[in-house]
Image (tube, helix red, strand yellow):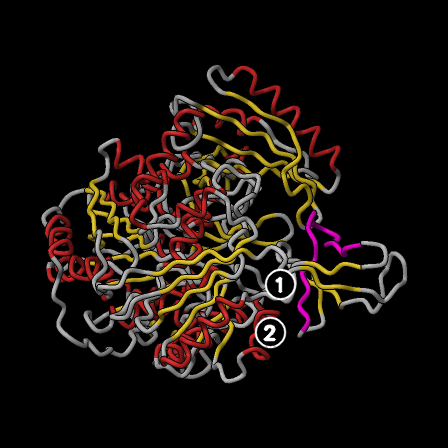
Amino acid sequence: MGVIELSSSAVVLSDQNVAVEVAVFAPLPGSFTYLWPDSLGKPLSGIRVQVPFGKGTRFGLVLAVTTVTGDESSTFKSVGDRLDVEPLLDHSRLAWLERVGRYYLASPGELWSTSLGWALQDDLRRFRCSEPARLAAHPLLANLFATRAAVTLKTILKRAAESGSTSGVRYALSRAVETGLVQAVAAQPFLPAEGDKGSEFVATADQQRAINAIVSHLDTFKPYLLFGRTGSGKTEVYLNAAESVVANGGQVLVLVPEIGLTPMWLARLTARFKHVAIWHSALSGGDRLSVRQHLDQVDVLIGTRSALFLPLPKLAMIVVDEEHDGSFKQQEGMAYSARDMAVLLAQELNIPIVLGSATPSLESWSQVEAGRYERLDLPLRVASHDTPMRSEIVDMRGVDAPLSDPLLNAMRENLERGDQSILFLNRRGYAPALQCTACGDVPECPGCSIRLTLHRRAGQLRCHTCGFRRRVPKSCESCGEDAFLPLGEGTEKLEEWLKESIPELRFSRFDRDVITSHARLTDTLAAFESGELDCLIGTQMLVKGHDFPNVTLVGVVNADLGVSLPDFRAGERWWQQMTQVTGRAGRGHKPGQVIIQTRMPEADWLTRISEDDAIQTLGEELKLREMLHYPPYARWVRLVFLSTKIERATEVATLFTRHCENLEGVNVTGPMPCPMERLAGKYRIEVLLRDASRKLLPWKLQPLLTGMVPPRDVRIRVDVDPQDMM
């Protein structure tokens, strides 16, 4: 990867031509050389450009300014357009991203397309020219503004393409804005209406100690792990510390793992801060543009992992809520951990960062044990009860119905009292599989090593991995019999069964099949919070950090899901999920009840679902990991080789493994098929590298990956610190 230099001067020699090294936004190794036209002004490192690439054009980032001789220049193409007058990122963020790229072994194109993705969707920017006639002296801009009305960049580029003069239009437009010939029309700030502040917050003694610790180090890098049980008031600690930051002129970034958490956060933030912005993938292009154009005015920005890349100019504190959640790990493109990148950014900017969880990741817990993070404890719930939480394990062996009698009776009693319930089943659809009872055949995804899930209401079989869909066949395609039987249950089947069992119950499903928009998400949560709904049936998106004071009953429909996966983190994730879901009950002034249904009632892990034993559970798991030399006491890098032909993937993986034999101190396992061997039509062969010293990987792999160019029919996915071993 080329070193980004922030010098604002261009290198110009009389007998040479100015050129630039460009990281094209594509998963390709290295950079590409392009000539720099004089018409685009002085070249700068760190600006985005549009370049010809293949049969079309792509965007890229200028890594360095250089020169080529006159003889060489004939072999290079020229930059087509310039997107930025000045670099988008300052020195600190450029240094941070360079460090991130080296650690995650990302190609320059992957690194910069990921980190600057927020800036690429600029077609909705609007411009106005008060005197279109004055543009006659500017050939590139002439006739692009037919009237004085504001037009979008998309329209301007379309008109330029129709006139046959697209090269340099963006830069010419930027210069026209600089000189005042054209005006940039900013979108209205995306600032939600202020909420109801409610009663004045009175901190508990534990909360106040945590707040004092954070605000006493606002001018330096300091990582905190806010370890508080569910309902202990972690959010209030964040908000009070954020108030001190904003009062001092700083900005706060809050990262959450799921879009589903943003309505709750927005309600609290807008009650305390004047300028609050939100950022996630479900936002419209207009809302995204509005946030970008007013970053300097934002007090608090809340968003999912991609919000980390927005260059808040006065960022003074970062909060990562539910820091243990696997959603913070990006699975496509550059496989980064937003949590770990946030810590590195805080270090680069010399600001505090607060990681919060009731069930911390073992990575963060080990940092506390090593003395690198300061632990702040919130051991008590804000709303305490004289009656302790009731917990019941129900043996479901031999029970055909999705809900047991104890859980069903508890729901009826809860309804009579006017309390609310949550049913947790981490499985979408009607049934996880459809089987022919005549021959035993189970329809599978044609592109993945996985069974198709039945969605009966839609009349479809769907793959939840690659998105493949097909109609439910009328008869078995193997034997011709009409003898299908749904196996197991999903949220759709639970919904159907509950309507028959408790017809008076007002409830809604809360999964990705139903919550298809931000508006539906907000409306469903608002209906539940206002008491219009008695019960929510949901998957894991329901149990992450939501606070429903009137929920006194939580039912776990199938607690066995996920605990037996062939992944060493399966037990940790299961414990975190179960602890989080059971923590939704009894958060108000009424005691809570939890009923857990399982077909393995004697399993040892069921005894671990207790926040009182969290420290012991984390300590025991850390000791086991240390003994086995597993993360976080070793660093792993997983490489997956993908191809439509298993022989080709295996061949390239084998060749790579041979190159790794010279890496002293690195243990190499593989090549071998992934647990899910096929995904979206590609065979997957993995090689796992393990470094017990944590000093060699991933850096020792960079020369190997740089020197190894895979054939076109094989793709290599590099995952440093893998979180999903499937």
Q: Position of residue 90 (x, y in %)?
A: 28, 48
| Amino acid, disc 1 | Glu
Q: Pointers 1 and 2 in contact (CB under 8 A)?
A: yes
Q: Position of residue 245 (x, y in %)?
A: 15, 57
Q: Which residues are magenta?
A: 441-456
Label 1 secondary element: loop
Quadrant of image for the N terminus: top left
Q: What main secondary structure does the magenta stretch of the protein show?
A: loop
- Which comes sooner in the sequence, label 1 or label 2? 1
| Amino acid, disc 2 | Trp
Instruction: Note whether 606 is above or below 645 in the view shown.
Output: below
Quadrant of image for the C terminus: top right
Circle on res. 497: 2
Instruction: Note whether 417 is above or below 643 in the view shown.
Output: below
**Residue 126 lies in the magenta-colored region:** no
Q: Residue at x 73, y 33 (%)?
A: 648
Between the residue at mark 1 and the residue at mark 2, the CA separation in whole angstroms equals: 10 Å
Is residue 649 or residue 206 the one in the foreground?
206
Q: Residue at x 54, y 57 (%)?
A: 558
Q: Position of residue 547 (x, y in %)?
A: 32, 67
Quadrant hosting residue 98: top left
Residue hosting label 1: 489
Specify whether 686 is left or right of 418.
right
Is residue 257 or residue 387 the one in the foreground?
387
